[in-house]
């Protein structure tokens, strides 16, 4: 039997099975002074870009409004315009940075639709490559992320400076 060491996953397990923290991380994290710790890559006027702490693939980003809003139709037109401009820029930055073959871009509206945080709308941008889904998730119920999240953050942060 082969062993795959992924000690960073313990934090996810503890958070998934432990008591849920108070508040909204999509509100609290971008307001913190520590963007690197909170994986925030960019602050716009009304929205921000952050990395997903538990990514589906390396480079998995999220765009969220700075204002707490749980409904797509609750966004003001200027928030929505900036939001989707940032989604577009994220796709371009990821394409240039990771040479992706494609993307999954979307919103999970409501817990039943898969939203881990259903009280604060956010758009996921997930880079995809031919062959990135292999036997590991199917046979071993294991997803392999091929780059440490800190390395991904450092590489992407410089690309968001002049956004």
Image (cartoon, rainbow, N blue to C red):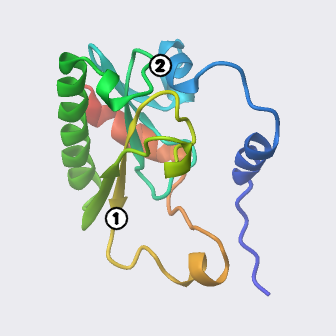
- x and y, in percent, of residue 56 in the image: 49, 57
Q: Quadrant of the N terminus?
A: bottom right
What residue sits 57% from the left and 25% below the top? 25
Q: Foreground residue, 47 or 67?
A: 67
Q: How many marks?
A: 2
- For label 2, the residue is 30
Q: Is residue 102 left or right of residue 24?
A: left
- x and y, in percent, of residue 136 in the image: 59, 79
How crowded pointer 2 is (Cα within 10 Å; few <14, some 14-19, many 20+) is rated as many
On the question of residue 162 being in view, the answer is no
> Separation of disc 2 and disc 1 at Cα?
26 Å
- x and y, in percent, of residue 128 in the image: 34, 64
The image quadrant that residue 14 belongs to is top right
What residue sits 56% from the left and 67% below the top? 144
- Residue sitting at the far bottom: 1
- For label 1, the residue is 128
Vertical arrangement, residue 72 with respect to residue 141, above or below: above
Q: Quadrant of the C terminus?
A: top left
Q: Foreground residue, 29 or 80?
A: 80
What residue sits 55% from the left and 35% below the top? 117
- Badge number at residue 31: none
């Amino acid at each position: 039997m082969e062993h795959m060491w992924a000690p960073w996953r313990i934090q996810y397990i503890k958070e998934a099975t432990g008591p849920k923290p108070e508040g909204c991380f999509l509100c609290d994290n971008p307001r913190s002074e520590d963007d690197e710790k909170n994986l925030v890559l960019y602050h716009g006027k009304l929205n921000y870009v952050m990395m997903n702490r538990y990514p589906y693939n390396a480079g998995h980003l999220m765009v969220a409004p700075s204002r707490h809003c749980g409904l797509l139709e609750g966004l003001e037109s200027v928030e929505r315009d900036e939001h989707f401009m940032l989604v577009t820029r994220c796709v371009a930055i990821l394409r240039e940075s990771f040479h992706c073959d494609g993307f999954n871009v979307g919103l999970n509206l409501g817990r039943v639709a898969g939203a881990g945080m259903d009280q604060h709308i956010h758009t996921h941008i997930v880079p995809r490559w031919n062959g990135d889904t292999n036997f590991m998730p199917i046979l071993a119920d294991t997803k392999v992320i091929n780059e440490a999240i800190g390395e991904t953050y450092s590489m992407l942060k410089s690309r968001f400076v002049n956004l």
